[in-house]
Image (cartoon, rainbow, N blue to C red):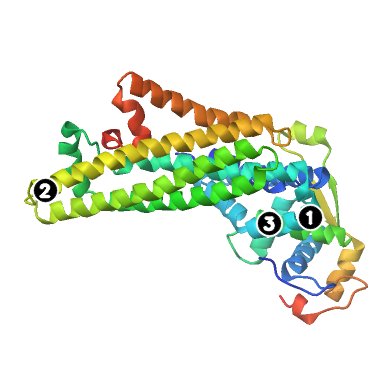
Amino acid sequence: MNLLPLTTASVLAWVRLSTSGVPPAAREARRAEILSDVWEHGHAARLMAEAPNATARAIASRCVRGIPADVVWRRRIAGRSLMTAEGWSARGAGVFLITIAAVFVTALTAGRIGIGAEVEHFRDDFPRLAYNLHRAGITIYLTALLGVVSIIAASLLYTALRTYSASLATASAFLLLAAGSLWLVEAAAGRALYDLAAEWRATAGQTGDAVWTVARAVALIYELLAFITAFVMLSSLLAFGVLCLRSAVLPRWLGGRATAAGTTPIIVLALGWLLGGYTYYVFLTGGTLGWS
Amino acid sequence: MGVRRKPGTLLPLELAILEVALDLARRGVVHWHGFVLARALAEREHSRRLTAHGTLYKALERLEQAGLLASEWEDPLVAAAAGRPRRRLYRITAAGETALAARSLPSLRPNPKGVSP
């Protein structure tokens, strides 16, 4: 997989974000200069027949190592202009990026535990979980991390945007806070499931019905929590998108993307639920599709 | 974060940039852009890692503000004809050469801590 286009886009997105809110002349100069640098880097690497992923790593490394200098530069250049409309836009963009990253990571990791509480799914999924505990362990830690990140993002969102719409900022931040808290609970449920699966595995499945029954109950809670969390998280994105669209100070492109990012999965989830298509919602709820 | 220094001093990276700029000028490359500089700096240090974007362009900006470097944007038509983004072309100034010789910013007191590479 060629990571160079994605890396280039990410670096340019970072430059766009880190230069938001600074005076236009300095902003445009910095953006154009990094664009030129990244292009020249890629071009030189192609001429030397360097592997695209090696170039991608080098460009990403240059971007990441320069972040402290970017922040210092930004603070010096932007100064009081951070209090302007563009400064608010930058904060909004920052909150959005954190939120969307959290959703993205969730979507990638949610299927990892891959437990379905329905009898026919659970019969296959629980033993599979017991023999893939390391994967479940990673998911649990990521889920807890997402919980913490979402709670931080919620406080940032509220602090940065309440001036523009107290009700929408409050609603959006509250939903994000709720999602973060639910993620923490979900991590705890995942941990309980992990322990039960480890116990079941240690006794080679001879633990009797008690462990099996408790595990299935926990799986039911886990699955339900995952579904609710995803819904709450997406609703938060939707509220944030509406806030962006209704606030003249926030960029409309942010609003459009946040609204789309929040709405589309909700529609898919709802359709899947209504049509009885289990496969539609397992992507975000940690159902069995993660293993198929 | 950044290295603290007293006013009037040059950081090791800034000195290195001026040295490379002077070296390039002596080899006939009077005007150069950021990526060329990053590569020349890496070659000078025998390193495979190029200077980070943020670090490099912050240093270039400071040197330009101090009058040690000058820059101009390439003609858009030239860039378009070459099928690439416009380059910002830098060159070392006479003041830059003087500062390099003195190892400090002109008209300001030198600080040995700031110039030690």
- Asked if disc 2 and disc 1 are in contact, CB closer than 8 Å, the reply is no
Disc 3, SS = helix
Q: Nearer the viewer, residue B20 or A202?
A: A202
Looking at this rendering, what residue extends furthest in the front direction?
A167
Residue A254 on image: x %, y %: 63, 34
Camera-side mark, 1 or 3: 1
Residue receiving disc 3: A71
Mark closer to the observer (3, 2):
2
Task: Examine the rendering and report whether any part of residue A131 can be seen.
Answer: no
Q: Quadrant of residue A202?
A: bottom left
Left or right of A99 in this view: A14: right
Q: Position of residue A28 (x, y in %)?
A: 77, 42
Asked whether A24 or A6 is in front, the reply is A24
Is residue A110 something one can see in this rendering? Answer: yes
Mark linked to residue A210: 2
**Mark 1 vs 3, N-terminal side:** 3
From the image, tell me which residue sits under label 1.
Answer: A79
